[in-house]
Image (cartoon, rainbow, N blue to C red):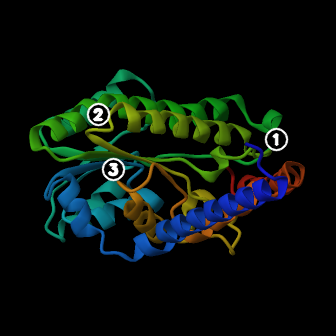
Amino acid sequence: MVIDTSVALQIGGAALFVWALVNMARWIWLYFWLPQRSIGERLAKRFGPGSWALITGASDGLGKAFAQELACYGFNLILVSRTQSKLDLLKDEIQAQGVQVRTVAADLSNTSPQTYESLAIAAQDVDLSVLINCVGTTVHRRYCDVAAKTLRHLLAVNVSTTAIVTHTLLPLLLRHATSTGRRAAVLNVGSIVGRFYWPGTQLYGACKAFIDHLSIPLAYEYRDQLDVLSFQPTVMATAMAAGTEPGAITISPERAAHAALSHLGHTLTSHGHWRHGLLAAFLVILPCRIRNALFLKEALAMGEVELANGK
């Protein structure tokens, strides 16, 4: 049977049109419809009302926003950060909402076994259902201008911490799933930088690509028990980006956390807020050479601000 060329082109065009419509509808569902839904009841039902969530990098920025939102949904919390005084302030604030809070002061750039044992001890006797790996750090400059000490710090915080914390606490999450019949969750905070080559912040991008490649296989390995979200936001108004954030795409940590939690259990990867999702879609179609030139220019400008701030 011979198919006329014009018919084949029409069929192919129609198929591409339908494919584009489906993807557009999914994009709107993910970035506009889901964040508008009431998600607290859904998360509590899915992971267990009154169960516990552990959050790294919890005392500031995005980690703090995750903690505050989950507390509003009735989750008890284990908050992990380097500074005990900040943890104590957040603990007092959140306990006023009627949930239980534990704190672990730990420098997660220290990858000794004792660092991770302290987290396991804090979570051992509770019903841990959610893990949010939020701690992270970056610098913006050419690779040769990054100090060796900074390289080691970036790798320890962005790679080793997420990998080892997940490995340490995964048995407790699976224990929750087995004992309650409900699902558990891992939400790993990556970055859009991990999805594109990004001159000027090359090591951070490599670290965040690692996060994505760690997260998605977990979703398939434990698909009967575990929800996994590889969360890839762009710029938020946090201390890490202070003075460097481009206003058009910058959102608050609270909006980013809400968007990410609305996607948890619905998709494996997400940029969270619609602004960041739109930026990612634009970057996909932008020619690589132009994209890299823009990225390097922006990164070096951000690096100048960091150096002026002593970073």
Residue 179 visible in image: yes
Q: Residues within 10 Å of mark 3 (few under 14, many from 20)?
A: some
Cα distance in 3D space between marks 3 and 2: 22 Å
Query: Residue 69 falls in which quadrant of the image?
Result: bottom left
Residue beneath disc 1: 142
Task: Report the Cα–Cα distance between label 1 and label 3.
Answer: 34 Å
Q: Name which of mark 2 and mark 1 comes first in the sequence.
A: 1
- Distance (Cα) linking label 2 and label 1: 36 Å
Does dot 3 land on a helix, a strand or a loop? helix
Q: Secondary structure at mark 1?
A: loop
Which residue matches tag 3? Answer: 84
Q: Are marks 1 and 3 in contact (CB under 8 Å)?
A: no
| Depicted 151 relative to depicted 9: above or below | above
Residue at 24%, 38% in the rendered image:
173
Which residue occupies the foreground of this view, 84 or 256? 256
Q: Position of residue 179 (x, y in %)?
A: 10, 38
Regarding residue 118, the answer to whether it shows in the image is: no
Q: Which residue is mark 2?
A: 169
Where is 84 relative to 241, above or below? above
State yes or no: discs 3 and 2 in contact (Cβ < 8 Å). Answer: no
Point out the frontmost of discs 3 and 2.
2
Give the amino acid type for the residue marked by disc 2 in the picture: Leu
